[in-house]
Image (spheres, grey):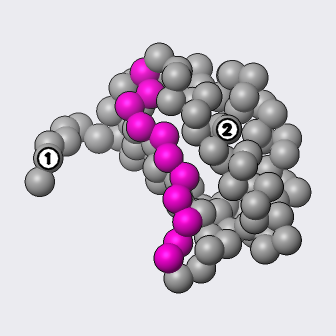
Amino acid sequence: MIVVAGTAVVKSEHRQEAARAALAMAAATRAEAGCLAYRFSADLEDANTFFIFEAWETEEALARHFQTEHMRVFRERLPAFLAAPPAITRYAVASAAPM
């Protein structure tokens, strides 16, 4: 399994537009084959900080995701929203189980 997690700080004047774009991106992505989870959320202490969490069955599924039309559109729109470069990390997970 591949997990992607990170943060992005958006400009306060673009927060609502960024949230709408993130929600549309998440909905389209969750319909992709191999997507186990895809969610944006806001920091409780700073509403302009968004968290991203993704889980993918395989590296190939994640690679296909980067080739989708909704990812292309999202990447084009993203720079207008961001106050700073996002901090995103990819993890290769050998096993996972409920706690």
Quarter location, residue 67: top right
**Residue 38: percent from the left, percent from the top?**
48, 40
State if disc 2 and disc 1 touch (CB < 8 Å): no
Quarter location, residue 56: top left
What numbered label is drawn on residue 18? none
Is 57 located above or below residue 13 in the figure?
Answer: above
- Magenta stretch contains residue 9: no
Residue visible at 69% across and 22% down in the picture? 68
The residue carrying mark 2 is 24
Closer to the camera: disc 1 or disc 2?
2
Is 92 located above or below residue 82 in the figure?
Answer: above
Residue type, numbered disc 2:
Ala
Residue type, numbered disc 1:
Pro
Secondary structure at numbered mark 1:
loop
**Residue 2: percent from the left, percent from the top?**
39, 36
- The stretch in magenta equals 34-44
Q: Is residue 64 left or right of residue 67?
A: left
- Magenta stretch contains residue 43: yes
Quarter location, residue 88: bottom right
Total marks drawn? 2
- Spot the residue most to the bottom: 45
Is 95 located above or below residue 68 in the figure?
Answer: below
Confirm whether residue 31 shows in the render. yes
The residue carrying mark 1 is 98
**Residue 20: percent from the left, percent from the top?**
72, 49
Residue visible at 58% across and 33% down in the picture? 27
